[in-house]
Structure formats: C-alpha cells, structure tokens
Amino acid sequence: MELRKILLTAAVVVLALVAAGPAGHVSAQGGAPATVGWQPLFNGKDLTGWSQVNGTAPYTVVGGAIVGTTVVGSPNSFLATTQTFGDFVFECEVLQEGGPANGGIQFRSESRPDVQNGRVHGYQFEIDPSARAWTGGIYDEARRGWLYPGDLNPRGQAAYQYGRWNLLRIEAIGTSLRTWVNGIPVAHVIDNVTPRGFIALQVHSIGKPEDAGRRTSWRNLRIQTANLTPAPLDDLFIRNMIPNTVSDAEKAQGWRLLFDGTSSDGWRGAHKTAFPDKGWTIENGQVCVLPAAGGESQNGGDIVTTEEFSAFEFQAEAQLTAGANSGIKYFVAEKIDPKGGSAIGLEYQLLDDAAHADAKAGAAGNRTLASLYDLIPRGPMPGGAAIVPRIGDWQHARITVTPKNQVSHWLNGIKVVEYERGSPLFKALVARSKYEKMEGFGLAPAGRFLLQDHGNAVCFRSIKVRPIK
C-alpha cells in the first residue's frame, strides 16, 4: 500500500509539472498548459521592452524577476511596457519583501504631456498588503479613484499573501475588466473610458523614511492578445460605470434597468396615477428633481416605481447639489397615511451632511448620508478618492435585501448599514423613531422604490434592480 501511495503522489506531481509554465507557473484559471497562446512581456534578463515613466524608484532585474524598491522623496513610480494593449489577458507573479508596501499594476494606462504634465493615469490592479486587504481591487489612477474597492468582495480580500509569490490575473476584453488573485475572482468593472494603453508596474510613494527599501518583485509576466475567451462568469457584484446600461454579464445575473435614461416608463407620482407634470426633468440620461422656490410642497412630489419588490438588490447613482436633502425609499407602502407628506417606507438617506441641518438631527447621526433614515446611522468609511462623498460627484448607492430580511446599505462600494428587518432590535429602533405610531412600518412583504422630492436639486441615473430568490 505504501508503494502505491508513493506512485500516486509521483503521478500527481508529474501532471502538475506538465500543466505548469515557466518556473512551475500554473494558469489562474487552470486548464490548458500555461505556454499555449501566451507571449512573454519580460525576458528574465534585462528591461528590454520596458521604460520608466514618472518617479525615481529603481527597477532592477534580480534572479529572473523585476524588482522595484521604495525610495524617499519620489512620487509614484511606474515601469511601463513600450507596447500598448487593448483586449488582453495578463498574468504575473508578485512577491513583496522588506515590509508591506502599497503598489499596483497599471493597465490600459497612458502618460501624455497634455494630461497632468505626463502623469500616469488609467486602470490599476491594486496591490495592498495592509490590513485593508484590497489587492485585486480596481483603482483609476490619477483620474476617478476607486472603481471597485476590495470591500465589495470579502472573499477576495483573503486571497493575497504577503511574503510569498502570488499569481495575479487581469482580463480586459471590450468594456469588461476583471481581476483574480491566486485563482480567486476579486473585481469586475464595466467601463469604456480607456480602450487601450500600456501595462506598468507601480512602486508607490512613501510617507516615512523608514519605509524606504521595501521591495516588490514581478516574474513570469505574460500576455494573450488573440483568440481571447472570457473566463466563465461568477457571482461577483459588477460595477458598471457606463450610465444607464446593463452589460451581458449583468443580464446573466438578473439585473435590469428601472430607468431607461430617456422616459418615465415604470414610474409615477406617489399617490398618483401618472408621472408628475412639474418638478422633475428627464434629460441627458438623468431623472432630476428641480429646486422648488416655495419648498417641497410647491414641487412635483415623490415618484415611485409601478412595480413592487420583495427580496432584491438595488443600485443607483445620485448627484447632490450643495445643501441638498433627498432619499431612496424601499418597501414603500402608500396605504400608510403620511398626512400629505412623503410616501412612507424605509429610507436610504441622501444628504449633504456638511451643509444640511438634518445631519445633526435624529439620534447618533442616523440622518446622515446612506443611513437608514432616523433608525440606524451610517458606519465608518475608509478614505480614498471616489469613496469619501463629495457634493457634486456621482455617489453610488446600493441596497440589498435577502429573502430572510437581512438588509444592507452600501455607499461607494463600502457597506455602511446592516440590519434584520422585523427583528426585535429593528422594532425597538422603530419604537423610538418618528415612525413609532405607524403600524407595520417597514414590514410590508413587498413594496415600491421611491425617489424623494425634498425641494432640492438632485439627479439620479443607472437605476437598476435584480430579484433575489
């Protein structure tokens, strides 16, 4: 029996070596031998085919790997391919030593004299060995900031391991941008801003002299550019940056638009049979509340979906003006008499926290942006471009409700509220809120979505939903 075990083990090792590419490398997706269809981007000897763009961090070749080292006084440094690439699948292995250091791999990126004096900008595969663990997230360097923070995929946050070689993969086909770390899917973005550009290895700037000398090594850099087949779809949340569109991947997940960008189809006024004839505009792919000189009572009123929903995932982008107040309500039950005010439902608050007095009302901040209005305050958010809310920018709102009534609010890719609808805690929160006398508040088995007219200028776009079974 021992001899049989030894022979079986040997056979497994041989098969693994056959399926491996250079240095025992196995594709992140498994399957075909690693050399089929791949072209090397690094010859393992020198930096032929690469040139440094921005920064003074040194890049050297050591032991068949490109090694970048952090230095004091340098901005972000990039070692870029002299070629540019449009559609491709890219893989490499990465090892960090000498201390954790933020970094990344740029793709479809550019450096042009007319843009920030040649600063590298474009998509970045984040390398983040910190406790935040956002490796594989997608960042838009020197442009829009975070498109897909790591918090959107907790499973992916555990994939990267500091101090060992990690297999990283980028798939950029058409508008679909996807990442993997050690075979685990991490991010999926749909975007059309930059269809082609170089690939670059980033050594991030450092803030403290003691962080100098930290090393990031890259090896087995390779690319496919022809006969590309997208990897099978997974169940990751897809962040679609193209307004009012649903990609094929989203459709496969069950997503559809609730606002088509051009008409009021699927919407009507709350407590009404038709869409308001004043107070709202639909143009430029946006549905917008107009400011009301006499306050919200003089405007068009709230709008609701003609459909009702129970368990679901909902998302929208909202753009607030200075001092604005609005909200996205769900499980709206028009039968609850609001005494002439807004139709009643659970509310994802939309607010200019810095300028509107409502941010200091309620209890413990439960009327701030993305809070469950008057019930649960928004939790803490990390820093970062396109994460920290800025008035005038588009904010990404997401609401999920499971069949077991587990509810969460997300703001710009960060989960900020979590609760169980109908739980003892939920009922206790309602009992001390402004809804205390409204029987059955927030407990309807199904309800409508509502966009609130609070008399302030607010716009919405990319309003989508998918049922959850």
Image (cartoon, helix red, strand yellow):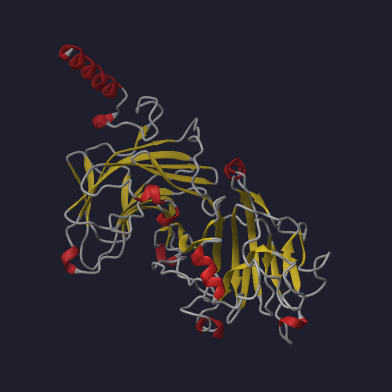
Residue 35 location (% of width, % of height): 35, 27
Observer-nearest residue: 62 or 144?
A: 144
Q: Viewed as shown, does residue 222 lie left or right of 320? A: left
Observer-nearest residue: 223 or 327?
A: 327
Residue 253 location (% of width, % of height): 58, 43
Res. 199 in view: no
Residue 251 location (% of width, % of height): 62, 43
Observer-nearest residue: 457 or 362?
A: 362
Quadrant containing the N terminus is top left
Res. 52 in view: yes
Q: Which residue appears at 29% of the width and 20% of the height? A: 15
From what the image shows, is residue 342 above or below residue 17?
below
Q: Which residue appears at 53% of the width and 81% of the height? A: 362
Q: Viewed as shown, does residue 162 lie left or right of 356? A: left
From what the image shows, is residue 40 above or below residue 267?
above
Q: Viewed as shown, does residue 417 lie left or right of 351? A: left
